[in-house]
Amino acid sequence: MIKAYAVNEPKGKLEPFEYDPGVLRDNEVEIDVKFCGVCHSDLSMMDNEWGFSQYPLVPGHEVVGTISSFGNNVNNLKVGDYVGLGWHSGYCMSCTSCMSGDHNLCSSAQATIVGHHGGFAEQVRAQAASVIKLPDNIDRESAGPLFCGGITVFNPLIQFGIKPTDKVGVIGIGGLGHMAVQFLNAWGCEVTAFTSSEKKKTEALKLGADQTLDSRNQSAIAGAAGQFDFIISTVNVKLDWNTYISTLKPKGRLHFVGATLEPLDIAAFSLIGAQRSVSGSPVGSPETISKMLDFAVQHNIKPVIEKYSFDKINEAIEKLRSGKAHYRIVLER
Ligand SMILES: NC(=O)c1ccc[n+]([C@@H]2O[C@H](COP(=O)([O-])OP(=O)(O)OC[C@H]3O[C@@H](n4cnc5c(N)ncnc54)[C@H](OP(=O)(O)O)[C@@H]3O)[C@@H](O)[C@H]2O)c1
Ligand SMILES: [Zn+2]
Ligand SMILES: [Zn+2]
């Protein structure tokens, strides 16, 4: 039996929960969880905000731990290896996306916390292909958040060929946003952090932003008209998207990774005239995750974390819910 924490209903508290994972499949590994980050998507799934949560639900998809057992067909990981697991815990391995290395776009990928029990647990299982060995010199206790939040903001830099000469913006300086600022700064870009928090303005500069703007101040944002090549939104709320689009250069892109539920109300002419784009993307492929981990080590990029022990898990969730997490909560065994 695997000992875990589960919620049984939307907005419910996490409670101790045990489940029988069955026989380990040939292509699977079992991970002893040492650390697990808490992503806003855990909260959205716990609360059934997206409408597809299944209960009992064991959240947790920013796992760092060690391999405790592996199936007969696994030959890239061994017992004791330090590994990470993110949003996806399996891929079909045969669709066009999987065959072209875009595993994160696989339409039948298994999500770690959707119809599968996640990392708020002593152990978690996953297909070996979705489990990435940690580089030796990475800081293990802060590495978990790279596996969802980190890869989600790093992957677009690869997908859209962001250049060091680009001027970029990050909207929302939370778990994802504070990592985006660090990556884009190390990438060589001029970075503007859009935040609704006075306090975070100073902190964003320390994380590598060159300047900050109030993410809710329409006239301040409008003052930056035509400046950006690329803006990434990590917020889960509706903001004034048309004003943000007006800050893009010709051919600029407003890219969504934050799961804003309200439909986008975008004026087609603001895209047509200057050939601008609006887009979105989910996490990243195993190969891009490995690339990101190496880049993070090379540039000493680390998620800024607050640690909680697993027995304070409900306190940790409330802290994230209140918007006061600084910047990523990591549960520690
Ligand atoms: N695409 C993907 O694959 C993927 C992967 C992971 C997460 N996500 C999604 O990304 C989003 C962010 O996740 P996270 O873990 O980074 O969440 P988070 O730590 O809670 O950060 C969200 C940030 O949004 C801003 N925000 C929140 N409420 C706001 C408001 N009323 N007005 C203006 N700004 C507001 C805040 O930034 P400031 O304090 O700076 O204003 C906050 O720090 C979530 O929707 C999550 O589900 C998507
Ligand atoms: Zn596939
Ligand atoms: Zn996540």
Image (cartoon, helix red, strand yellow):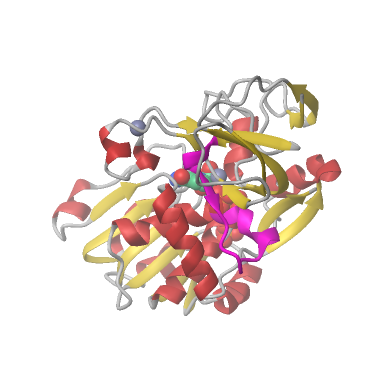
Asked if residue 220 lies left or right of residue 254, the reply is: right
**Residue at point 44%, 37% (across, down):** 262
Lateral position of residue 11 relative to residue 213, left or right = right
Query: Would residue 168 appear left or right of 118 to someone viewing this image?
Result: left
Check if residue 136 falls in the magenta segment. yes
Q: Which residues are magenta?
A: 127-146
Task: Identify the residue at image location x=66%, y=26%.
Answer: 57
Q: Is residue 181 left or right of residue 141?
A: left
x, y percentage for residue 152? 46, 52
Q: Nearer the viewer, residue 23 or 193?
A: 23
Image coordinates of residue 158 in percent, x first then y, are 33, 60
**Residue 66 location (% of width, % of height):** 68, 48
The residue under the point 29% across, 31% down is 95
In the rendered image, is residue 15 in sight? yes
Q: In this rendering, does residue 237 appear at all?
A: no
Q: Is residue 180 magenta?
A: no
Residue 193, placed above or below residue 176: below
